[in-house]
Amino acid sequence: MRSSPQARDPRIRLLLGLLDESFERRAWQGPNLRGALRGVRAAEAAWRAAPGTHNIWELTLHIAYWEYAAARQLTGQKRGSFPIAGSNFFRRPVSPTEKAWRADLAVLADAHRGLRAAIAAFPPRALDRRPRGSKYTAATILYGVASHNVYHTAQIQLLKSLRSKSRRGR
């Protein structure tokens, strides 16, 4: 399969690499998002460290939403096409079942595929321009998404550790 002219651009390759490392490719900083979520069951995803705090499930959909929002900005797609009503943080779980958790993990995977496709097709000359309605350039948005993923991956790892310790009675 031949790569697109955009994918041969070094800045597009770098942005795709950053996004891939934050999401599913081996990275030097530790677990990527998919690695942090691997093996997490619905009960663990729904657990809260304290009342009013976000859980793994909510962080997962928050990440999915911002990957979707970044792709939407790059492509000019209209708002409102995210598969779950709302924006930013979504109260979860609505139904704390494994099926519901897997469905929301699929939302994350779809959002990631959409963002990756938008980056691969993005014209490199437009990386330094601000998409309509944004105060940031496309390049800033894209490396910001990768940083956002790493930030919330660390929170997910912390929540997993806290839950494990609370179950052991510590």
Image (cartoon, grey):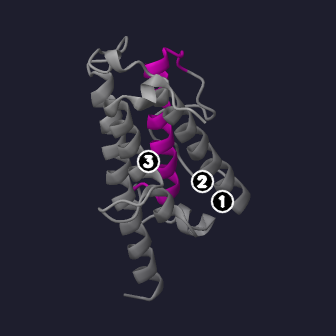
Q: Of the residues shown, which amino acid type is indicated by label 2?
A: Pro
Q: Mark 1 highlights which residue? A: 96
Q: Is residue 57 magenta-colored?
A: yes
Label 3 residue SS = helix
Distance in Å between CA atoms under marks 1 and 2: 5 Å
Which residue corresponds to the image point at 70% horizontal and 62% vertical from the top-left?
98
Where 92 falls versus 166 (above or below)?
above
115 within the magenta span: no
Residue at the (37%, 11%) spot, across then down:
132
Residue 20 — which label? 3
- Which of the 4 quarters of the picture holds residue 18? top left
Q: Is residue 78 above or below residue 141?
A: above
Q: Is residue 5 left or right of residue 14?
A: right
SS for dot 2: loop
Circle 3 packing at 10 Å, graded few (<14), some (14-19), many (20+), is some
Q: Amino acid at mark 3?
A: Asp
Label drawn at residue 93:
2
Residue drawn 32% across the image and 15% down it? 125
> Which residue corresponds to the image point at 48% horizontal and 14% vertical from the top-left?
76
Per the rendered image, the range of residues in magenta is 53-79
Position of the C terminus by quadrant: bottom left
For the N terminus, which image quadrant? Answer: top right
- Cα separation, mark 3 vs mark 1, equals 29 Å
